[in-house]
Amino acid sequence: MQTFKRIAIFLLALITVTYAFEFMIAQPSTLKILIKEAEREEVNTVILGESHAETGLNPYALGKGITVKGQKCEAVSLAHRILPVVDQYYLLKRVTDNNPNIKQVFFEIDPTYWQGKSMYYPGKDASAFPFCSIPDKMDYFKNILIKQNYNSAFFNYYIDKTSLFYVPQNIICKLDPDYIEGNEKAIKKIYKTNGVSFNYKYVGKGYRQGVKRSGKKRLPKGFKAGAVNGQTLNGFDRIADLCRKRDINLVCFISAIPVERIRDKDENYSAIHNYFDELCKSKGVDFYDFNYIKTEYLKRSTDYKDFTDCDGHLMANFSKKQTAAFIKAYNSKNYSDMFYKNYNDAVSAVKGVKLK
Amino acid sequence: MKETVIEILASIRPDVDFESAEGLVSGGILESFDLVSLISELSDEFSVTISAKELVPENFDSVDAIVKMIESLR
Amino acid sequence: MGINTLAFLLFFVFGITVFYLLPQRLKWPFLLLLSLSYISFKDIRGIVFIVLSSLSVFLGGRLFEKRNEPKDASFRKKILILTMIFNLGVLFFVKYVKPIYGAFSGKTPPELDKIPFFDSIIIPLGISYYTLQILSYLLDVYWGRQKAETNYGKLLLFTCYFPQMIQGPISRYGALSAEFFKEHRFKLHNLKFGLQLMLWGFFKKMVIADKVGPYVQRIFFSHKEPYGLTVVLGLIFYGIQLYCDFSGGIDVIRGVSECFDVKLAENFRQPYFSRSLGEFWRRWHITLGSWMKDYVFYPLSLSRPMAKFKKSLKKKVSRVTVNRIQIAICDIVVFLLVGYWHGAESIYWAWGLYNGIILAISALLTDVYAGWRKKLGVDPKRKLWDNLFIARTLVIVTVGWIFDCSKTALGSLNLLKNAFIISKTSFEPIVLNLVDWVEIAELIIFCAILFKVSRMKERGVVVREKIEALPFAVQVIIWVGMIQLVACFGRSSGEVGFMYANF
């Protein structure tokens, strides 16, 4: 009996510490709240992607310029920083299961998530697993969770460079009545806890605006068509298939990044453009690359005032302009006329920029 | 023969007392180059061919074991 | 099914549960079934290789014992050579044909993959490990040290035992079969110690090795060439990464096996505390070193051609010198083989040669070194000299890692040259933003934990036993703490893979 008692005490201690750590370290979830928003029956458009989409496309402005089957475009952004593409599939499945009025998906492509190993970010509100239906949970378990580090199945948190600084705010937020009820008001508070509030302001509908520059530096990541992550590609395939099956209009786009990055040979941007252009053609979906757009539709500049950092998160003003360009492309009969056909033209078109 | 064997061992490893030592190989007292030197000397001294077949710890773990092995090869 | 994935954990739990529920006589056949299914998860074609190789060795062993008269000696030799050629031939073909063709034709790996012939070559899981392992059985039977196994299933289990398929250790039939076929009773102690060893392996691999890995990537395998201290730091990081990755993986493997009540040999014994390169190779990848010693070094030393060579030398130089020359030659041969075992690319044999030459020189200059030690008044019992020897070995070994940090041997030598251009040192790959210092601080703490535990092991303390002797509450704190440490800090990605897998 002594042994069983010891094992029981050990397990109890482990489980208690696990729950305590999860409460303290795991970020409060904005996805939880935004999914609820996206499932309101008036919503007919969903924006998917990672952090560039969060800051890049303004759902309010979309509503003013786009109509969906005669109705005003009512968009909610489910884009989330570091959310893997395959999780975006499960999110889309969940909201379109519950809201059949969704007839449009604007999908942002961030090439850095398409290279390298499959990433799974426990405790960063970057997983669709908690929100899946039971059959989808099993599907997720079989396709994704079982291939992950065993810790991901049991411990929904991890400590990175800045996690510990946010513990007090995490606790306060999770005890807040707005958060517990799932009100969108809580998102402004959540933003204070996940490190993005310093430079961004949450506006609504999943959209945040860049308001201040951060000094963060970034090393070029490069891109190889042969090194595309299989799971990411599979996630995209599933999104495209789901949209086709449910008669949902899928539009893909790459949000603008600083011209300095595109000019840097180490980034290999022409390979990026060609790869995704091919991919979208093969799926029969529209593709807007805002790094190839003609300057009369979106003026890109060489200084960084349009972005909050070198990575390319948009400042409020620039995202307004990008959304306007998006609307123009969406409404035009032949959007490809709005874009340059090759890398050299796209780069040298920006005033004062010569090819490196 | 025993004295000759001890003499040879002592010339290779003067720091070990081989009269009473056991586990020369299994205990790691003799290292691989010691063993190679030993085999070379023993082969020459006693005109026997020591091959890989004989290279088991039991044959080299003590002076007596070595003597026994050499005698069996003659 | 990487060893740190949930899939493997579930596989392991299933395996353990069924293993201890089955009656004794079905236990080892179940281990065999488990091992074969593990291989089929990776690639079911691997089973064909395993069966053919083990069958060849099984038949070879039986033939040796059947035809054991002195007159059959040449027949036995022929069978030995045939079986060895077959198994080594398969290994060579699967691993080396592509890079060797590439070296001669000048084609790069992506170009080679486009050729259907090379694209179709599969590398069966664990082939480098199990080939050596079954050859050790074959040679032991040939030399009469081991009785031939009469039950093919048992030899098959020896060939494909799943914990070893990932990265060893390379076991001997005598020791491992005793473990496989003994009576296995469920003892909570085995499970407890096995799980604890697995946790320690996960700590080394996931918390340290995977955290250091990105630095090594950024320093050596990104767009910017490293210079000066960047190279030095990169080598140190790589040394930490390689040790923690490889020995951590081995700890997980041994822990898994311990849960099945099968003890596997140690493969690492605090190698960075070695006082010489020779000692390092008795503490690092121990089972490969001892395999080379028993099946290459000694047989080569005692072979007829070598004896002839030594005889002819004895006319010119002293006996002692002849032995030293012979040892030097064998050292170089052994380490070239060690290099080639890792791969056919120039970085591997160049690294092998680097180690072989240093050991050969130290064999040839034994007296010279002894003379210097006397002159300098070296007293190995004094801590100062001990630490100096350890530092010297660390430098030699760390410089050797340069061969892993480039794609070619020439590239590595170029890196080494660049290391002296101190002025172009850049710390950007390591600390780009201020907040990156947090990670460095974490890394230092984790390495300190590793160091403390390694020191305890060096002094002969069995750490798990020491912890078991502590009060229960302290034990709970320690183990819950360790599990949480790995959970909180041990995530870089899902199936990162182990560096010594795919060998």
Image (cartoon, rainbow, N blue to C red):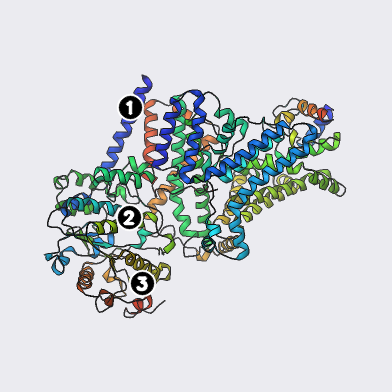
* Side (left or right) of C12 relative to A188: right
Query: Where is mark 1, residue-wise?
Result: A9
| Residue at 45%, 55% in the rendered image | C215
Q: Chain of mark 1?
A: A
- Spatial distance from mark 2 to mark 1, Cα to Cα? 42 Å
Q: Nearer the viewer, mark 2 or mark 1?
A: 2
According to the image, label 3 marks what residue?
A260
The amino acid pointed to by label 2 is Gly
Corner quadrant of residue A313 = bottom left
The N terminus of chain C - image quarter: top left
Q: Amino acid at mark 1?
A: Ile
Callout 3 crowding tier (Cα within 10 Å): few <14, some 14–19, many ≥20 = some
Foreground pick, C340 / C426:
C340
Residue C180 lies, with reference to residue C449, above or below; the image says: above
Q: Give the image location of residue A240, x and y in percent.
A: 29, 59
Residue where numbered disc 2 is placed: A235
Query: What is the secondary structure assignment of the residue under circle 1?
Result: helix
